[in-house]
Image (cartoon, rainbow, N blue to C red):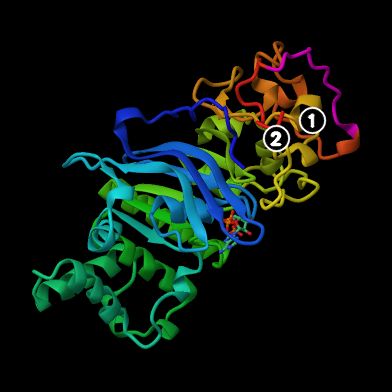
Amino acid sequence: MTVEGAPAPPVPAGGTDAVLSVRGLNVVYDGTTPVQAVRDVSFDLARGEVLGIAGESGCGKSTLAYAMTRLLKPPGRLLAGEVVFRPDDGPPVDLSTLHGEQLRRFRWNRVAMVFQGAMNALNPVLSVRRQLADVFTAHRPELGRREREDRCRELLDLVGIGPERLSSYPHELSGGMRQRVMIAMAMALRPDVIVMDEPTTALDVVVQRDILEEIDRLRARFGFAVVFITHDLSLLLEISDRLAVMYGGRIVEYGRAADIHTAAHHPYTVGLLRSFPSLRGPRTVLHGIPGIPPDLSRPPPGCPFTARCPYVFDACHRIDPALRPAQTGTATSQVACLHYDPAIRPDGPPPELRAGRFDPEPARAVTVHEPEVGPDDHADRQPSE
Ligand SMILES: Nc1ncnc2c1ncn2[C@@H]1O[C@H](COP(=O)(O)OP(=O)(O)OP(=O)(O)O)[C@@H](O)[C@H]1O
């Protein structure tokens, strides 16, 4: 369900320095009850930055990753939106215009992807050497055998694996090593963007940290941008320049990671922040967010977070808020919450929310009195109203 009549999605920070621009992306999974997995998603990925995408399971993170790399398969279908890649050595490319061989080349050369559970995606009957070399054979046919071998060694070295492992088969490697091999493959052709969907979730914390440090080092050296997807917000706060928090298929908060860390705006982001232990900071009492995310085959009217939000008020049940600049806190953050809509809440959000506190007890939810609003006062009103 899209928010018809809503203003065009705002163009977040990033501007002309964006290597990838996503505008108004809507994805549906067709079926007897279609699932609208991604709704009106827009963002810019700046050159060399790490954009973290956070959110609970089922909020549309993977679908977004597939849609933005044109890897979506039926029953998934792009309903609307565009993804534009801006190389630094040529004109912008609208991804929807690429097909067949052009698209295949684009994926490895320009935007590479490391999938969820990618370490199990290596072919079990081929050696590491063969799998890395195959990337060069397919995309750099001009390279001779010796050069290919050198590149394979160099790649493994980049991800901290010795050349003797070139002869290994996947089952002879640890999970962390297999994941490093997958990252090496993604980097093989020096892409401008690497999309990583839960690349370290299956690994233990120490290996996870090693790999994240490796990714950061490589990014600093080669300058590629990273879209890093995980449900673990505390991890994203550490590694991301900017963050997009997804809920119910939409981005509900978007801004600099440091700003969101110190001043989260959306009640969902505040709740998420209180659900994860910090990787470094002091021990704190953790509070989960009661309830479950909405069923995207039957999205609720109004704001998708209504059923779980301690700050819900009448208008939230009717109006699906658009992402808009937050009127409090930092200038870069955007938030999809009616508490930040000056037409509805001229005094801004309640002080508890402003202070980034999340009350996990819905029974103690704050009472908010909303002003009378005329039917035409909000462009982001549901069409059924
Ligand atoms: N192939 C499919 N067919 C139908 N619905 C799907 C399909 N894949 C995903 N969905 C639905 O789309 C919604 C978004 O799923 P998606 O996997 O993108 O979320 P996610 O945030 O990445 O979750 P996770 O972290 O568990 O992968 C969910 O409601 C999911 O059930």
The magenta span reads 364-375
Label 2 crowd bin: few (<14), some (14–19), many (20+), radius 10 Å: many
The relative height of residue 108 versus residue 42 in the rendered view (above or below) is: below
Q: Main secondary structure of the magenta part?
A: loop
Say which quarter of the image contains residue 82: top left
Amino acid type indicated by mark 1: Val
Name the kind of residue labelled 2 in the image: Cys
Asked if 174 appears above or below 23 in the picture, the reply is below
Contact between marks 1 and 2 (CB within 8 A): the answer is yes
Name the residue nearer the viewer: 381 or 103.
381
Q: Nearer the viewer, residue 348 or 3?
A: 3
In the image: residue 148, left or right of residue 304: left
The circle drawn on residue 303 is: 2
Q: Tell me the residue that label 1 is attached to.
A: 312
Q: Please provide percent x and percent y for residue 209.
A: 50, 57
Q: Is residue 51 above or below residue 31?
A: above
Q: Residues within 10 Å of mark 1 (few under 14, many from 20)?
A: many
In the image, which is nearer the foreground, mark 1 or mark 2? 2
Q: Position of residue 353 (x, y in %)?
A: 73, 26
